[in-house]
Image (cartoon, coloured by chain):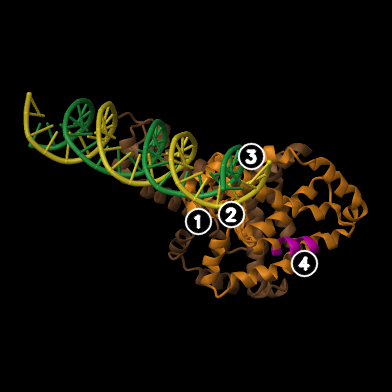
Chain colours: A orange, B brown, C green, D yellow
Amino acid sequence: MTENDKLTEEKIFESATAVFIKKGMDGTRMKDIAEHAGINKALLHYYFRTKERLFNAVFEKIAGVMFRKFAPVFDAETSFEDKIRFFFREHITFLQQNPGFPGFFINEINRNPERITKFLSNIDIKSLWSMLCEQHCEELRKYNITEETLPQIMVSIASMSVFPFAARSVLEGLFGKMGIDFTQFIEKRKTFAADFVLKALKE
Amino acid sequence: MTENDKLTEEKIFESATAVFIKKGMDGTRMKDIAEHAGINKALLHYYFRTKERLFNAVFEKIAGVMFRKFAPVFDAETSFEDKIRFFFREHITFLQQNPGFPGFFINEINRNPERITKFLSNIDIKSLWSMLCEQHCEELRKYNITEETLPQIMVSIASMSVFPFAARSVLEGLFGKMGIDFTQFIEKRKTFAADFVLKALKE
DNA sequence: TATATATTTGACTCTTTGGTTAAACTATAT
DNA sequence: ATATAGTTTAACCAAAGAGTCAAATATATA
């Protein structure tokens, strides 16, 4: 094995990731993954036993990476405003590099909602949430954010970042007719979304 | 045939809609649709030839209904502000009644992006767009909305309405741990989202 | 080098799947 | 009633799918 050869298992995992993202669990053929990796189909089973195990490995990796991207919002020592700007900048950049993640993720959680229950059970949401509330106690009062509106705001923020990628082909279809470039639209969105949210909050 | 019996073709179409929404094109078995409709599998082919034709019929129906819901935003004779309030109220109510549509739609356009190109070719977006711009010419200037920010705003509005349904199971998972009820969250969202957007726009 | 161990393959199995077909059934018009 | 057209079914088919396995190859180790 030469230095730059990837291990077979890695090669399989990466090919599986690519194909699963493109075709989804149900639309993916083990043969496709094997061909993508340039190996024999039986090797997939040698390393991962079944299609479902291979898929679970891929899904958990992606879900983990996606959720870890939300972490800085909770633990950074910056102001509420800075966190919002930071989030949109970093999260949209991340999605630019992984544009298929939102569509893949939304698809699979809809087909199999139990998956997310299991995944979330590893995370202590409640303490993250109260950490956020305590850390920005005064700011939240200043912005007039209540226990009821905070979830609405958080969901709005996530929506604005994730949705354009999930609905990418629709937007590209619409934009195409109006002379708007999707890539440019996304680049602008990093600051637009932050400004938009902050203006909506500002007293 | 008694009065309240549905025509077989309708029954098939409705069953196909239900199953396709739940399982997606790739995850759906013709057998499942037949069983759901309580008929023989061969009847599906008698009425719709192939799985793909049946799916296309369902997809086009759903896509049509979804996009028609956006129409009042373009042709109503109300103010910009009223349109935003009207949209969130009506659109979220529509999604409450069809909570599976966003997930289904996002999934299928990601698996097969050409589908949306074909679908959008029937709609004259450009003239709808310029209609909107002309109709609210002064308001747009008042709110300081430019040619560049208008698409950002429209996408933000769509995001805020659609995304919570697409990511429903994630939100339910998170909310469950925090004592938040998804149904109630959605009900509140009709006014929250409108207020949020309008505040973000207001000079 | 010889032996044990890990990796890779082609050929195979068994099940599921979309789709077909010929026959049976139903309703209706003459 | 009976011929005709439309509807429904059971039985069938070929292709594709996930998964298996024994043999072959490479790799490490003594």
Residue A11: mark = 2
The residue at 34%/35% (across/down) is: B41
Mark 1 and mark 2 in contact? Answer it, CB < 8 Å. Answer: yes
The three-letter code of the residue at mark 3 reads Arg
Q: Quadrant of residue B195?
A: bottom right
Question: Which residue is tagged 3?
Answer: A115
Q: Which residue is mark 1?
A: A38
Q: Position of residue C27 (x, y in %)?
A: 22, 31
Where in the figure is residue B31, as x and y percent of width and height?
39, 35
What chain is tagged by disc 3?
A
Residue span colored magenta:
A85-93
Chain hosting mark 4: A
As helix, strand or loop, the secondary structure at mark 2 comes to: helix
Q: CA distance from mark 1 to mark 4?
A: 47 Å
Q: Secondary structure at mark 4?
A: helix
Label 1 is placed on what type of residue? Gly
The residue where tag 4 is placed is: A195
Nearest to viewer (mark 4 / mark 3): 3
Q: Are marks 4 and 2 on the same chain?
A: yes
Residue B133 visible within the image: yes
Q: Are marks 4 and 3 in contact (CB under 8 Å)?
A: no
Vertical placement of residue A43 versus A38, above or below: above
> In this rendering, which labeled residue sits more in front, label 1 or label 4?
1
